[in-house]
Amino acid sequence: SNKHDLKGKKVVVTAGHTIEAIDPVRYITNHSSGKMGFAVARNAVRRGADVILISGPTHLANDTGAKLVSVRTTAQMHKAVEEQYSDSDIVIMAAAVADYHVLRPSKQKIKKTGSKLTLELEKNIDILKTLGQKKKTQKLVGFAAETQNLLENGQQKLISKNLDLIVANDVSRSDIGFGSDENEVVFMRPGKENINSPKTDKNNIAKMIFDLITED
Ligand code: PMT
């Protein structure tokens, strides 16, 4: 879109995965490439917004025009988002945030002495939920990454995180979701009919997000 309908707006976008250390050489993460979040940031820049892109480790070059803030852990992403939140107009969390961290990461490389190894995991803070709890004038957009019951789980996250829009995608498919250039999503808003996107480029999904969030 060439219309500068986001001029003067501050947009915060998260992208990619966060990582949680097991020891100095090993970590827990997920398959997010950052493509979806980068597409969202790119579209916001095109529409004239001031855009902060908070991203976990990614192989993507930042060609979005957004200001990039690089983070690794969920705690770092949380801090970076919090620092930007109060004066932001739109926050879009496309990042795949690790839901747990290793309780006591080993300071040394763990030796492979035992035939079994047990890691104790502790739940991470839900960044988006904390944003929803203190939302003032911001528009809050989340994603829902599901392998089953897409609509039920998406609806539940929309309400429990106090969002204005959730973008639900089926991450069990290899042609959409993680890593691919395309996505196919259901847009869900409180008190409104769901909208199904076609399977299309992630840049088009990004455009649809801003079309919906600026609708009213
Ligand atoms: O990066 P790509 O390879 O392009 O893949 C895109 C994608 C599949 C990662 C993306 O489309 C997507 O679905 N992102 C959300 C992934 C996710 O963590 O979904 P979730 O259903 O577990 O979380 C729901 C929402 O809460 C998300 O907006 C997430 O950013 C947020 N969250 C989750 C956990 C947590 N501790 N804090 C959060 O803020």
Image: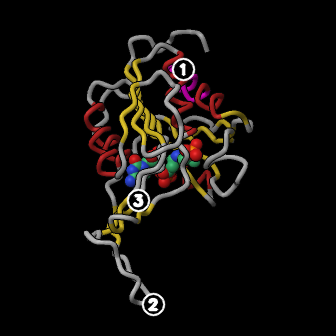
Looking at the image, which is closer to me, 104 or 212? 104
Give the labeled residue for mark 1: 215
Q: Is residue 203 left or right of residue 153?
A: right
Circle nearer the N terminus (2, 1): 2
For residue 212: magenta?
yes
**For residue 88, above or below residue 32:** above
Give the spatial CA distance, label 1 vs label 3: 32 Å
Colour style of the rendered protein structure: secondary structure
x 44%, y 11%: residue? 7
| Horizontal and vertical percent position of residue 32 | 54, 49
Q: Comparing marks 2 and 1, which lies closer to the viewer?
A: 2
Query: Is disc 3's CB within 8 Å of ligand 1?
Result: yes
Q: Secondary structure at mark 3?
A: loop
x 61%, y 27%: residue? 208
- The magenta region covers 208-216
Circle nearer the N terminus (3, 2): 3
x 36%, y 68%: residue? 22
**For residue 182, above or below residue 2:** below
Circle nearer the N terminus (1, 3): 3
Give the labeled residue for mark 2: 115
For residue 20: magenta?
no
Looking at the image, which is closer to me, 111 or 20? 111
| Horizontal and vertical percent position of residue 24 | 33, 64
Looking at the image, which is closer to me, 210 or 24? 24
Instruction: State the predominant SS element of the stretch in magenta.
Output: helix
Mark 3: few, some, or many residues within 10 Å (few <14, many ≥20)?
Answer: some
Instruction: Note whether residue 15 is visible.
Output: yes
Mark drawn on residue 158? none
Q: Comparing marks 1 and 3, which lies closer to the viewer?
A: 3
Give the labeled residue for mark 3: 99
